[in-house]
Amino acid sequence: MTESTITAKGQTTVPADVRALVDAKPGTRLVWSVTPDGTIIVRAKSKSILDMAGMLKAKKGKRVAVEDMNAWR
């Protein structure tokens, strides 16, 4: 098991072997979650919603313009 220490400023270093496993580079964002039993889960946020653009194919049929989707504007 890999360990790190929290500094007086609340900072810690992600161990090199963990960084390698998730392919973390400088600037990689981490998402921290605490479960009700106190377990801490840290996930590397490696993708943006913009990275998913074009993944889904449009259904055949009527298309809706962006302007029509945002009727409140």
Image (tube, helix red, strand yellow):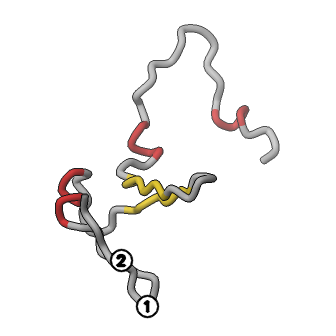
- Look at mark 1 in the image and give the residue it sits on: 8
Seen in the image, is 17 located left or right of residue 73?
left
Seen in the image, is 22 located left or right of residue 70?
left
- Look at mark 2 in the image and give the residue it sits on: 12
- Residue 7's x, y, as percent? 39, 86
Amino acid type at mark 1 = Ala
Look at the picture and state if 16 lies above or below 10: above
Amino acid type at mark 2 = Thr
Residue at position x 33%, y 67% from top? 27
Circle 1 crowding by C-alpha within 10 Å: few under 14, some 14–19, many from 20:
few
Look at the picture and state if 52 lies above or below 12: above
> In the picture, residue 54 is in which quadrant?
top left
- Residue 10's x, y, as percent? 46, 83
Look at the picture and state if 60 lies above or below 50: above
Residue at position x 45%, y 89% from top? 9
Helix, strand or loop at mark 1: loop
Residue at position x 44%, y 45% from top? 50
Look at the picture and state if 4 lies above or below 22: below
The Cα atoms of the two marked residues, 2 and 1, are separated by 10 Å
